Image: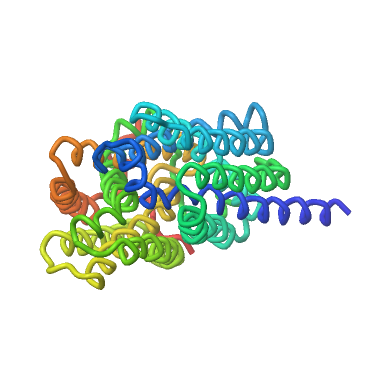
Amino acid sequence: MNTQLSNSKRMLTLAGTVLTQFALGSVYTWSLFNSPLSEKLGDPISQVAFSFGILSLALAVASSLSGKLQERFGVRNVTIGAGLLLGVSLVLTAHASNLFMLYLFAGLLVGFADGTGYLMTLTNCVKFFPERKGLASACAIGAYGLGSLGFKFINMYLLEHFGLAQTFNLWGGLAMVMVIIGGLMMTDAPKQTAKVADAEDTAEVTHDFTLAEAIKTSQFWMLAVMFLTVCMSGLYVIGVAKDVGQNYVHLDGSTAASAVAVIAVANLMGRLVLGIMSDRVARIRVIALALVVCLVGVSSLLFLHLNSLSFFFAVACIAFSFGGTITVYPSLVSDFFGLNNVTKNYGLIYLGFGVGSFAGSIIASLFGGFVATFYVMLALLVVSLVMAITIKMPGTPKSDHANASRSIPVQQN
């Protein structure tokens, strides 16, 4: 009876998480709105697109704080609250009449709502499936990626038939209902199950680094730089893909908008392919591969003669790398610093998710376009790739040199 009840709870939680993640993933259609908002507000696209950088930063900060909210209020209540805030924020965005209001409503509030629901519901769902963490993670993360694809068609239809303001109202209402229904289906995962499963799944963890110990290692900051680099590349391109296609590659609006679908599919493929690969290959090597793919994409944007095909290839490479990195990184951080404190350790590194996108938008705003940001991305990718190739596992803190020289295996079996 208890087993049946437990299975029912975890399957309902999985279904609710998939529904919630699908709705939260809708924010990745943001590039569809840059041109209409630019026309409405009378401001340059680069300044309008800056709202997505703020959104990403708020998302990252909220994600790092959502665990504490869950401890206090429970996953169901926090998810419902996130859904309400997301819906209200998108409705308020419909009435934004200047950049400040856009940054506040679409950037800060939408990002905070999305981030509050994203990482918390994902990790809660995975804890329910200690024997199939990869499958549960793939379902949840895949739904988040599919959300941008599904809402690409929904939001394009709404923009065409109802106009900008009403699109935000309808999008907000639909996303809010989906997140609230998903939240009502969720239950907090039992804590001990995840801890035992993680211990069984990890090869040989000799020490769990606290956050204070981890930040004293060079490896922590190297991982942070690599994560920030991929997030800066991925989130910036996702946020302005349609505008890059129109204004940089000189595609027509309909063709340029197809980049949103290309990004969504590539993002999802990156999450699935690199996520599965990370169970068979050392995760730092998977990240190195992701950096190479991203480097190819950014180099293509800068140095290839761009047409629709080469443009789609470039953004697909960047989205593939971004999706895979986001999927692999929590486990990678646990490989380096242990499982018991991975939420805090990864939580700090995860701030690079928002900082990277924010930095990309600032560079574009200060230097007047996409190209300057692409060159900075290129330089950071080269540096990060060198780090990924040369990084070593940290030694046990507060130990003698002999113990500190021991490596913690990266590979999971």
Whole-percent x, y for residue 174 in the image: 61, 48
Q: Is residue 402 visible?
A: no
User: How many numbered circles are shown?
Assistant: 0
Q: Quadrant of residue 282?
A: bottom left
Q: Residue furthest bottom?
A: 309
Whole-percent x, y for residue 173 in the image: 61, 43
Whole-percent x, y for residue 95 in the image: 47, 33
Say which of 339 and 157 sits in front. 157
Q: How is the image coloured?
A: rainbow
Left or right of 331 on screen, residue 21 = right
Please give the name of the residue rendered at 64% of the width and 55% of the height, measured from the top-left corner: 129
Q: Residue furthest right?
A: 1
Q: Is residue 215 above or below residue 330?
A: above
Q: Is residue 367 above or below residue 289?
A: above
Say which of 17 and 112 sits in front. 112
Q: Quadrant of residue 266?
A: bottom left
Q: Is residue 371 visible?
A: yes
Whole-percent x, y for residue 351 in the image: 37, 36
Left or right of 268 on screen, residue 21 = right
Say which of 25 and 252 sits in front. 252
Q: Quadrant of residue 365?
A: top left
Please give the name of the residue rendered at 57% of the width and 54% of the height, measured from the top-left corner: 200
Say which of 248 and 402 sits in front. 248
Left or right of 171 on screen, residue 360 = left
Task: Specify the quadrant that holds the N terminus.
Answer: bottom right
Please give the name of the residue rendered at 37% of the width and 54% of the height, measured from the top-left corner: 325
Q: Is residue 40 above or below residue 325?
A: above
Left or right of 120 on screen, residue 366 = left
